[in-house]
Image: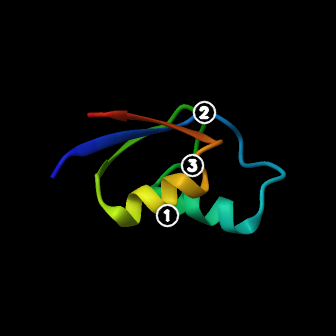
Amino acid sequence: MAKIKVTKVKSAINRTQNQKRTLEALGLRKMNQVVEHENTPNILGMINKVSHLVSVEEA
């Protein structure tokens, strides 16, 4: 399966609890942190929820 790189580019301050938990579930804690995930529907749904806080690129 294809891999994608997810980078946190905006802060989670003043965001809803759901968005904060989604970022934590993706493994993103610090600014500009990059994590790799499989390109699955679950991960894509989580990225879609916080798309305004992260940037995504193919790995």
Using the image, determine if residue 50 lies above or below residue 41.
above
SS assignment at label 3: loop
Tell which tag, 3 or 2, sits nearer the viewer. 2
Residue 56 position within the rendered picture, expressed as x and y whole percent measured from the top left: 44, 37
Q: Which amino acid is tagged 1?
A: Ala
Cα distance between the residues tagged 1 and 2: 16 Å
Q: Quadrant of residue 4?
A: top left
> Which label belongs to residue 29?
3
Q: Residue furthest right?
A: 14
Q: Earlier in the sequence, mark 1 or mark 2?
A: 2
Residue appearing at x 67%, y 36% in the figure: 10
Residue appearing at x 30%, y 60% in the figure: 40
Is 39 displayed left or right of 28 in the figure?
A: left
Q: Nearer the viewer, residue 20 or 48?
A: 48
Residue 14 position within the rendered picture, expressed as x and y whole percent measured from the top left: 84, 52
Residue 52 position within the rendered picture, expressed as x and y whole percent measured from the top left: 65, 42
Using the image, determine if residue 29 lies above or below residue 5.
below
Using the image, determine if residue 58 lies above or below residue 14.
above
Q: Nearer the viewer, residue 43 or 25?
A: 43
Cα distance between the residues tagged 3 and 1: 10 Å
Q: Nearer the viewer, residue 32 or 52?
A: 52
Residue on which the image places disc 1: 25
Q: Which amino acid is tagged 3?
A: Arg
Residue on which the image places disc 2: 9
Residue 6 position within the rendered picture, expressed as x and y whole percent measured from the top left: 43, 41
Residue appearing at x 60%, y 33% in the figure: 9
Residue appearing at x 71%, y 41% in the figure: 11
SS assignment at label 2: loop
